[in-house]
Image (tube, rainbow, N blue to C red):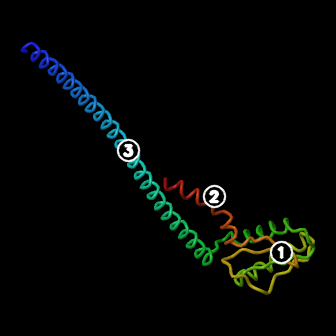
Amino acid sequence: MDDVSNSIVNEIEVVLNEGLDAANKMIEESESKTNNEQLVIESQQVKESDIKSRQILGAAEIQSRNSTLKLLEKNINNVFTTSLKELSKDKGKNYQAALAAFIEEGLSSIDADDVLISCNKQDNSVVKTLVSKLSAKHKRNISVSDEPLKTSGGVIVSNLDDTISVNNTIEARLERMKAELRTDIVNKFK
């Protein structure tokens, strides 16, 4: 019976050892799988953290750029406002020639025998003098409006029924030039 007992004990030991080996193998595989999954999770966390960092930095850069552009736009608008005020006070020695050029430009754009020139109250006498010369030169009936414009200077040239007009006021000309002037100003701040 000792042989049978030893044989059973040996079989039990073999089964236990196989079970233990299988359990150890399962533990090792589980640990390896867990380590691999942990490495994948850590790698994903690093990637997500990197993406979030870039998003935050990108948003901060955009916000900074927008703040800079808003401040620059505010200062550019202040320059335009100040320039208009200065032009209203002192138009300079070439202003009469500029008015004549503004009227000539308007006349060349309007194909009508009767033309109306509108200007502000301060420029009325100068414009009337220019109109008397230009009427003969262009062989047109050019008159000056009795209604003064609320403008810093310049003129609006139109046909009598006001279906065609050329706005050559200082404000309108400045508005048409703003994009170009903004670019020049921005380039000076770079």
Q: CA distance from mark 1 to mark 3?
A: 63 Å
Position of 41 with respect to 95 (left or right) is left
| Residue 183 locus on image (x, y percent) | 58, 56
Residue type indicated by callout 1: Ser
Query: Can you say whether 167 is above or below 58 in the image?
Result: below
Q: Secondary structure at mark 1?
A: strand
Query: In the image, is 48 to the left or to the right of 69?
Result: left
- CA–CA distance in space, label 2 to label 3: 40 Å
Q: Residues within 10 Å of mark 1 (few under 14, many from 20)?
A: many
Residue 47, given in percent of the width and then of the height, sits at 38, 42
The residue at which mark 3 appears reads as 50
Q: Which mark is residue 158?
A: 1
Is there CB contact under 8 Å for labels 2 and 1?
no
Q: Which mark is residue 124?
A: none
Farthest residue, direction bottom: 146
Q: Residue at x 58, y 60 (%)?
A: 182
Q: As drawn, is 134 to the left or to the right of 20? A: right
Mark 3 element type: helix
Look at label 3 and name its amino acid.
Asp
Dot 2: element: helix
Label 2 is placed on what type of residue? Glu
Which residue is at a point 81% across and 77% down the rendered structure image?
117
Give the label, 1 or 3, closer to the camera. Answer: 3
Mark linked to residue 180: 2
Give how far apart the Cα atoms at labels 2 and 1 are: 27 Å
Residue 22 percent across, percent down from the top left? 24, 25
